Amino acid sequence: MTAKANSMREQFRQESKKARERIQTTPDGMVGWVIRFLQTDLEALTPSEWTVLAFEVASFVDDLTGRYGGLVATESGWAVEAVPKGTQHERLPSRQEALTIQKSLLAQLEAYWEKAYVGFTFPQLTLIVTAPGAFDEQRGTVVVAAQQKIKEFEYRFAHLLAQSGQYIRRCPECSKIYLAIRCDQLYCHPRCQARVASRKWREARKAEEKKEKRHGAKRRKG
């Protein structure tokens, strides 16, 4: 491999490392990053902004550290022109693929909110269960091999949903998707709760004024 190719590969790995660090330091961790991703207008991103996010999308799937549900072994992935041939495992998603992921995850969340459960299907996805000791002395490991990176993303999301789904909600006031900190939390922020309370108070006040006007009109007629 030439010096230029080595340099490009190292640069790719460094950018992937930075992306993993950004995901891990996002408020609420992986779940917080996914929520932010779902609310990003991908088509409005500049090329440089998209490249930054593309590394994060790829790293969300490819990061093997702290994975819930085991390791992921990929069979194919996303293409990036800057990566020389022979390093096909180092790939980035296209903007259209990320849009497909985003729409799929939002549809799954809507189904989860409506029915309290959601089914996932994974064509071209292989789950390999290893015995304890192969990767972990205490328990077995699930290794995932997919021919579609989109499905690996959804697989990771399914595990996150199993862990934190009951706390991923859509604010009924501003429609923002957020991670609740309490089981009884209804709104994403006290501002939204205050707006709703204020609106209800005004509506109640108007109803009371109308009621008083009707009663006053009846007294005058009487």
Image (cartoon, rainbow, N blue to C red):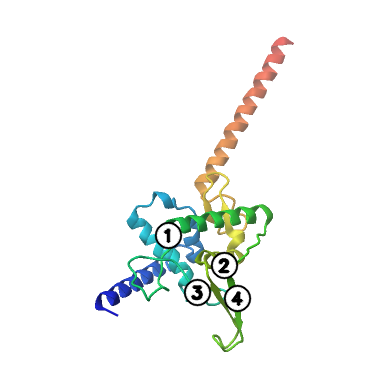
Closer to the camera in the image, 149 or 30:
149
Q: Earlier in the sequence, mark 2 or mark 1?
A: 1
List the residue tagged with mark 1. Answer: 94
Mark 4 or mark 1: name the one nearer the start of the chain.
1
The three-letter amino acid code for the residue at tag 2 is: Tyr
**Is disc 4 surrounded by few (<14), some (14 to 19) or many (20+) residues within 10 Å?**
some
Q: Residue furthest left?
A: 3
Q: Quadrant of the C terminus?
A: top right
Residue topped by disc 3: 75
Quadrant in the rendering for residue 54: bottom left
Badge nearest the viewer, 3 or 4? 3
The dot on residue 155 is: 2
Q: Is residue 207 above or below residue 141?
A: above
At label 3, which amino acid type do we have? Glu
Query: Which amino acid lies under the numbered mark 1 shown in the image of this protein?
Result: Ser
Count residues near mark 1 (Cα–Cα under 10 Å), then give few for <14, some for 14-19, many for 20+: some
Mark 2 or mark 4: which comes first in sequence? 4
Secondary element under disc 4, as helix, strand or loop, is strand
Q: Regarding mark 3 in the picture, which secondary structure is present there?
A: loop
Which quadrant of the figure has residue 157? bottom right
